[in-house]
Amino acid sequence: MERWGITLPLPGMGLAEQRDIVAGLPALGYTDAWTAEVNGTDAFTPLILAAQWASELRLGTAIVPVYTRSPGLLAMSGATLASLAPGRFVFGIGTSSPVIVEQWNGIEFAQPYQRVRDTLRFLRRALAGEKVTEEYPTFRVTGFRLEAAPADPPALALAALRPQMIKLAAAEADAAITNWLSPGDVPTVRAVAGPGCELVARIFVCPTPDAEVARAIGRRMVAAYMTVPAYAAFQEWLGRGEVLRPMQEAWAAGDRRGALEKIGDEIVDDLVVHGSPEACRERVAEYQACGLNTPVIALVTPPGGEVAALVRELGRFGGLGR
């Protein structure tokens, strides 16, 4: 099945206002709806609503941080959504970032690879209905069992930006989730994941024919992300380390304006999809042609853009419906 996803909630609208748009997504060719969790809505609530609004959509979290909820609470939340959307929920987890975990939530960001691995192993057992008593390297669980395990446990996905985590996703999860890559980067990730691992990627899409407007928006996004150590290391692995270094050095020195000026057009054009809706659809399809299974559009609304119209035009069917 050819997948075509979108990120919920959509920008610039209240969550409750999105019902009609979400209900219409399958007719436009969208197969998936995925959420994130930073400092806006939590990852689960939009999917609970989407499960009721559009029964055909596969739903996924990309991602829920493993530090900001206890293992048992993660299992309960995942089980609830799996019961609401049997057979169509993908539970994506990941480390998140030190800013979100430590600065915003006051939790130590320690042993990220091990913590994700341990949480993945715990969730696999707990969501299958097992009673779990285990001394994991990063936490301990004694006698936990879900009161009502889902009849159809969710698939598990793992946020993975570098080889070690990608290999873990391929070996122990059902999918690997990534973002901030170009179509040409997909084969690099696929080579590590192997042929049998589903690859999911959030792709930032700014549908506007005004390239300068899109690039100005894109520069701010690139600077915000590529100064985070995990994303900087990911780009280094993909071969963009040298071209991004002047921006990162300016940012670290407190020169925000200078940092933006050091992000060339080619970087933005590589990592942010922009152009007419038709051109954006074609660019997203390039990711699939290069080996990505599930593109997840993250709509970046240009000035004056109308969200419902853009969602319609970016649909796999080009806004025509079935």
Image (cartoon, grey):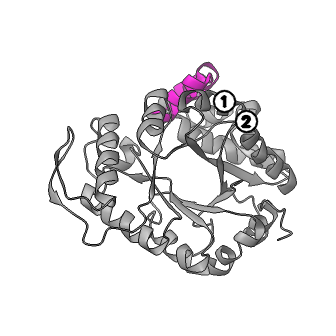
Quadrant (top left, top right, bottom left, bottom right) of the C terminus: bottom right
Q: Position of residue 217 (x, y in %)?
A: 69, 48
**Which amino acid does the dot numbered 1 rest on?**
Pro
Query: Mark 1: few, some, or many residues within 10 Å (few <14, many ≥20)?
Result: some
Q: Which residue is mark 2?
A: 290
- Badge 2 marks a residue whose secondary structure is loop
Query: Between 93 and 310, which is closer to the camera in this rendering?
Result: 93
Query: Between 222 and 203, which is closer to the camera in this rendering?
Result: 203
Q: Which residue is mark 1?
A: 187
Does the magenta-highlighted stretch encompass residue 232?
yes
Query: Mark 2: few, some, or many residues within 10 Å (few <14, many ≥20)?
Result: some
Label 1 with label 2: CB-CB less than 8 Å: yes
Q: Is residue 134 left or right of residue 317?
A: left
Q: Is residue 269 left or right of residue 54?
A: right
Q: Quadrant of residue 27?
A: bottom right
**Which amino acid does the dot numbered 2 rest on?**
Cys
